Image (spheres, rainbow, N blue to C red):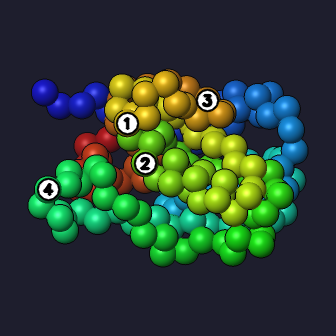
Amino acid sequence: MDQRKEILTWNNVDQLIDHLLPQFETTFDSMIMISRGGIVPGGLLAEVMDIQKLFIASVFFPSELEDMERPRLLAWPSFLMFPADDLLNSKRVLIVDDVWGSGRTITSVKNRISAAEGYPYTCVLHFNPYRSLFGANRPDFFAAITDAFIIYPWEVDRDSTGSFLHDL
């Protein structure tokens, strides 16, 4: 059975951002956008919230089994890019990604900020509780709950397999 797909417009994204904004009851010292999915929504939020200190986290999970006894979903992340701990220490940091699917990436970023003694807050446009590996844990802020594969306007040329879409 194919997963349901939902193709969003820029207007849909604006509505999601508008839904997120009233949820923020605190100000943030900085923002970490998770590459690649969090860069566009993070940029939009940074602009409207006037967050000046922006960072990128690039997280890689091994796709091949390095240890044949451990399932791939238990693999430790590699941080290809991440701000220095002293930039996070004692800071309120908004972590932005497009989707919380399994939750592995955003949770890894959150834990690394906590280890640097920062105060992480997670934010996504879409939360998929049906795929989450973290039980009752959920994003601090999210605009919508979905079970669909979301195709954002900045990636409209691709589908869930990475193939180009020709019949939109």
Q: Secondary structure at mark 2?
A: helix
In this rendered view, identify the residue nearer to me: 5 or 29. 29
The residue type indicated by label 4 comes to Glu
Label located before the other in sequence (2 or 3): 2
Q: Secondary structure at mark 4?
A: loop
Asked if residue 43 shows in the view, the reply is no
- Do the numbered discs 1 and 2 sit on residues whose CB atoms are within 8 Å? yes
- Which of the two discs, 2 and 4, sits closer to the camera? 4
Label located before the other in sequence (3 or 4): 4
Percent coordinates x, y for residue 6 in the rendering: 38, 32
Percent coordinates x, y for residue 166 in the rendering: 25, 50
Mark 1 = which residue? 133
**Residue drawn at x 70%, y 70% as measured from the top left:** 85
Vertical side of 95 occupied by 3: above or below = above
Give me the C-alpha separation between circle 1 and circle 4. Answer: 19 Å
Query: Are there few (<14), some (14-19), or many (20+) residues within 10 Å of tag 3?
Result: some
Label located before the other in sequence (2 or 4): 4
- Do the numbered discs 1 and 4 sit on residues whose CB atoms are within 8 Å? no
| Label annotation for residue 143 | 3
Label located before the other in sequence (3 or 1): 1
104 with respect to 72 (left or right): right
In this rendered view, identify the residue nearer to me: 151 or 101. 101
The residue type indicated by label 1 comes to Leu
Mark 4 = which residue? 69
Give me the C-alpha separation between circle 2 and circle 4. Answer: 19 Å
Label located before the other in sequence (1 or 2): 2
Mark 2 = which residue? 104
Q: Secondary structure at mark 3?
A: strand
In this rendered view, identify the residue nearer to me: 44 or 89. 89
Percent coordinates x, y for residue 150 in the rendering: 40, 38
Give me the C-alpha separation between circle 3 and circle 4. Answer: 38 Å
Query: Are there few (<14), some (14-19), or many (20+) residues within 10 Å of tag 1?
Result: few
